[in-house]
Amino acid sequence: MRLAKIIELKFKELFNETPLIIRSPGRVNLIGEHTDYNMGFVLPAAIDKAIYFAITPRNDDDCVVFALDINEEYKFGINNLKKSKKGWPNYLMGVVEQLNVSGYSLKGFNCVFGGNIPMGAGLSSSAALEAGLAFALNYIFNFGIDKLKLVKMAQKAENKFVGVECGIMDQFISLFGKSGNVLRLDCRSLEYNYFPFNFENISIVLFDTCVSHSLAFSEYNQRRKECDEGLKVIQKDFHHFQNLRDVSIDLLNENKAKLNKIIYKRCEYVIRENERVLKACTALENHDLAAFGSLMYKTHEGLSKNYEVSCKELDFLVDLTKDNPHVFGSRMMGGGFGGCTINLIENDSIESVNKMIAAEYNKRFNIEAKIYVTKISNGTNIIDVNENEKA
């Protein structure tokens, strides 16, 4: 039985109503890593792993939400939002808070949700939760909020209520994803363009290292500071530059003597990564998967050697794919120091490649790697559990 149907049946069991069903996907980012907070370009896609919501409005101010995956219910009032130690309700209450502060006349609701986005794999289950509820409440209460405003509300829900200073990419792609396409997002202007990723014989496969090194959070903040430091040096002579994405590699090299070695390496990576995103889009327009995959490998090299956010487990997984003719591209994905590699693999060879990767990784680190096979999907939408997607 499809997961959406299970969600619907649980809702009917709890509330004895027929609900609206919403699907909100997780995401991958094919190329463009650590460029978002430098106001550069990213190239994400929504995927076929998602969170499903069954929801109906109430006539009072009470909200009853049920998390199917952990079999747990939580109740709160629209005008009595207090952080929960449970964690997961905060993502939902954060969305409600954003609707409240934006002046929308919100009532209570009943909701059951659950999904198949792997937790901790860097596929943005939190953004799917926020975007999905924002979309659902906008629909059932007929607020008429446009998708970009919903994106900003979902991001603020995580920034303000949950307390995580995430960028806008995850919520953006969750709502704007389009089947068969990746989305190039300009993180400064929020302008976006779709590029076809319609390689029918290729799947996006994630190899999860199942490690998370303690350096991740502190080093992430340190990289942001290093990028800012490099930008400030250049701004002394070029006051009009707002972000690193304004700096060319030639201009960076002209100022190399003014930068210490570490700062130079960080800035060089970010500038070249923005260039790679643009080149990757050209490769897709030319239907050139080999060129696209080559750029992914160059991104990983930059992340490992210049930005220094990889780790031995991630490097090992990428290295295993380099001479395999059935793998077109591979790189680490996400903040770094653990998590997943993202790989483009021929469908007919997925099983053999997966077996090889799992065996070699286990032999080297004595860890069972988790493997997720995904496809690009539509963004958040209404679905009929007995038919196809409506929107």
Image (tube, helix red, strand yellow):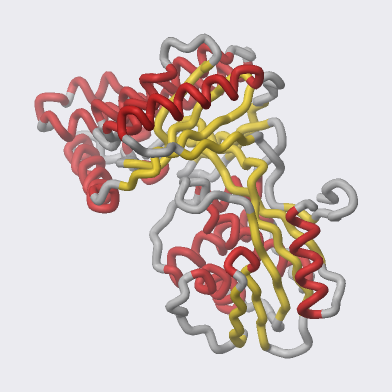
- Give me the residue at 69% from left, 39% from top: 377
Left or right, residue 131 beside residue 188? right
- Give me the residue at 52% from left, 16% from top: 328
- Give me the residue at 25% from left, 23% from top: 251
Q: Position of residue 317 (x, y in %)?
A: 39, 27
- Give me the residue at 80% from left, 75% from top: 13
Question: Can I make out residue 39 in this image?
Answer: no
Question: Can I make out residue 92 in this image?
Answer: yes
Q: Quadrant of residue 72?
A: bottom right
**Position above or below: 240 against 257:** below
Q: Position of residue 95 (x, y in %)?
A: 58, 70
Left or right, residue 318 beside residue 269? right
Q: Quadrant of residue 310?
A: top left
**Position above or below: 318 against 120:** above
Total residue callouts: 0
Q: Position of residue 278 (x, y in %)?
A: 49, 24
**Position above or below: 118 against 350:** below
Q: Quadrant of residue 294?
A: top left
Q: Position of residue 340 (x, y in %)?
A: 43, 38
